[in-house]
Amino acid sequence: MTGQNISDIIEAYLKQILAEQQQIEINRSDIAAQFNCVPSQINYVIKTRFNEQQGYWVESKRGGGGYIRIEKLQSTDLDDYLQHLLELVGTQITENDLQMFLQQLYDNQLLTKREAQIMAIMGEHKTLNVSNQEAEETLRANLLIALLNSLRYKRS
Amino acid sequence: MTGQNISDIIEAYLKQILAEQQQIEINRSDIAAQFNCVPSQINYVIKTRFNEQQGYWVESKRGGGGYIRIEKLQSTDLDDYLQHLLELVGTQITENDLQMFLQQLYDNQLLTKREAQIMAIMGEHKTLNVSNQEAEETLRANLLIALLNSLRYKRS
DNA sequence: TCATGATTGACCTTCGTTGACCATTATTAT
DNA sequence: ATAATAATGGTCAACGAAGGTCAATCATGA
């Protein structure tokens, strides 16, 4: 939202295209030149903003005629999709990770905005208020897993 | 009341902007420099004068292009009722207690059926999965308290 | 005096930026 | 064919740029 840094601007640029295109294929050097940054910054943007937790699939090829392709994942089968997310969660997640998952669920209309906000608050550090960080992340993962499972089985 | 100390002055400054703006995004160092104080004083002001109890929502990001965003919340007309519920919660609650609270909230149309269901699942024994029963009930109370507080205000 | 709130600064965590070096693929010269 | 070379993208560690935490200290009013 608040694009002060280059990464945010590049993110916005790519997402604007992806809003209409489903997938995009870029040339790393070109984009880097266009936004006046080093090529590896593109990797940073992709890693932090277009990962699987956020619902994107990335493929690339090196060498002459190389490319980076970013694809917006769309769920054909709901159950497969949720199961896939469940696998991604693992046993521990950070507050930021949770944020990404919730955003994705909202984007895919599996949660309302309010539901996502409530879940975000449930997963906040200050809400959980446990001393041990490991325990906190485990607990947060448990909450998300329970949510995903509930979306899987109890649809109404 | 009137600003004798820097904290009051910074508070007044921010609230004056928020009187017209609904939300404000600041750069901690800039504000600190502007009021000739150390950056951490901004945190102090926010913590003591812009917390959730006082109807504000604060988000921040570190690193390059970081920010602190303060959002003014709109209190609902059911604030008194929610405060009353908050007093009832105490520090620990059982799964059954949680059920009753959620039913109340649903009956009063403060939660949708789905939202209540999600919250119930969050508070389940098997979701929280903590060994100690005291800890479990404390945690469950924390979740409910966070929910009630979030319902007290409306984000725009 | 003493309790409470305000101020300060040392140290920490997170996020973004950069560049050196690496790996893979396509093209061109032999 | 094979070997060099050019054209891509990938990784990673160092550094810089925010904001966060916490405990010590100071100030003030009851």
Image (spheres, coloured by chain):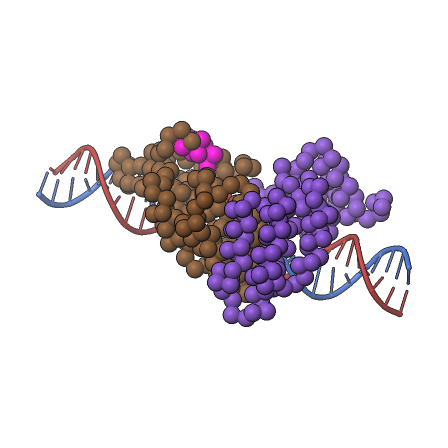
Chain colours: A brown, B purple, C red, D blue
Rendered position, B61 above or below A135: above
Question: Which residue occupies 71% across, 37% down?
Answer: B18
Estimate the x, y position of residue B88 in percent, counting from the top left: 69, 58
Question: Which residue occupies 71% across, 49% down?
Answer: B81
Specify the quadrant that holds the C terminus of chain A: top left
Estimate the x, y position of residue A26 in percent, counting from the top left: 35, 34
Residue sitting at the far top: A20
Q: Nearer the viewer, residue A149 or B67?
A: A149
Magenta part mainly helix, strand or loop? Answer: helix
Question: Which residue occupies 70% across, 44% down?
Answer: B78
Q: Nearer the viewer, residue A156 or A109?
A: A156
Tell me if A25 is positioned left or right of D24 in this view.
Answer: left
Specify the quadrant that holds the N terminus of chain A: top right
Q: Is A13 colored magenta in this rendering?
A: yes
Q: Quick check: can you spot residue B33?
A: yes
Magenta-tinted stretch: A11-18
Q: Quick check: can you spot residue A36?
A: no
Q: Is A58 colored magenta in this rendering?
A: no
Question: Which residue occupies 33% across, 37% down?
Answer: A69
How many marks do you count on the picture? 0
Tell me if A149 is positioned left or right of B35 in this view.
Answer: left
Estimate the x, y position of residue A47 in percent, counting from the top left: 41, 45
Q: Nearer the viewer, residue B8 or A144?
A: A144
Estimate the x, y position of residue B130 in percent, counting from the top left: 51, 66
Q: Nearer the viewer, residue A119 or D11?
A: A119
